Amino acid sequence: MAHASALITVMVAAARKAARGLSRDFGELDALQVSKKGASDFVTAADLRAEQTIFEELSKARPKYGFVMEERGEIDGVDNSNRWIVDPLDGTTNYLHALPQFAISICLERDRKPYAGVIYNPASDELFWAEKGEGAWLNDRRLRVSARRDIAETLFATGLPFRGRSGRPRAMKETERVLAATAGIRRFGSAALDLAYTAAGRFDAYWEWDLNPWDVGAGIVLVREAGGIVGAVEEPRGDPLHGPSILATNGELFDAARDLILGKAEAGA
């Protein structure tokens, strides 16, 4: 890979090794869809196997680092400055339905801030990676966020709360505001890939509430290294990694996008 450091090489190797199991299991899902047992238990097992693989690979490479993992939770390390933030399968519902929109997300957090990130979609073989000060990349191609300034021409991405979770009325109001003023919204079901696509200029902006650090850590690095801005919906300088919301845009749209989402801008303005 172009300009990949030893750190990124370690992260990519862990992601690719875990991806082999996810890809193999993904090929079995069509048969499971029509079985009486169903696919949920199968996908949970695939998720856990992928997380175990990533844990083993990263532990071997950097034995002193701690972890924050979706399934295992927090694991303290000897090194208090560095810890891995891992989502072995972001887009579980897509994976469950045999939709090829899912990813492995690995972030290195250094001193409570995202420092390096890898997002890998095994189904498309798209590997997004970034390290602070080294730019953002898709495989071997340098990434840049989009340059759109006119809200009416922009494409946003978001996520909506699952059944049983709070926040749906707010999400519906925000979505209606954005739909009325932009070229459209996409809801693909993977926060990690939404952020990676924003870094790649496929989306102009992405926002969501009530996520976890493993959903967004790697993507924050990607967007920032691609020239974008990442903050929070409720507070521009808020912490998108540990806070209640995230807003990521190209370098031109952050304030306008935030005003639109919060209802501070008139539709079409």
Image (cartoon, grey):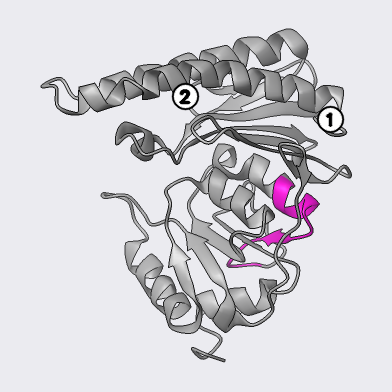
Residue 230 is one of the magenta-drawn residues:
yes
* Quarter occupied by residue 9: top right
Residue 263 visible in the shown view: yes
Q: For mark 1, give the secondary structure.
A: loop
Give the mark nearest the N terminus, 1 or 2: 1
Q: Is residue 102 left or right of residue 234?
A: left
Instruction: Write down the region rendered in magenta.
Output: 222-235
Where does label 1 land, which residue? 4
* Quarter occupied by residue 23: top left
The spot of residue 132 in percent (x, y) is 84, 42
Cα separation, mark 1 vs mark 2, equals 29 Å
Question: Which residue is at 76% across, 68% downward?
Answer: 251
Compared with 153, 54 (above or below) is above
Compared with 230, 16 (above or below) is above
Q: Is residue 184 left or right of residue 9?
A: left
Q: Nearer the viewer, mark 1 or mark 2?
A: 1
Question: Which residue is at 81% across, 29% downward?
Answer: 81
Residue 154 is one of the magenta-drawn residues:
no
Total numbered labels placed on residues in the image: 2
Where does label 2 land, which residue? 71
Task: Pick the residue in front: 262 or 116.
Answer: 116
The spot of residue 52 in percent (x, y) is 53, 13
Residue 80 visible in the shown view: no
The spot of residue 3 in percent (x, y) is 88, 33
Question: Which residue is at 49% across, 76% downward?
Answer: 183
Q: For mark 2, give the secondary structure.
A: loop
Quadrant occupied by the C terminus? bottom right
Identify which amino acid the numbered label 1 is placed on.
Ala
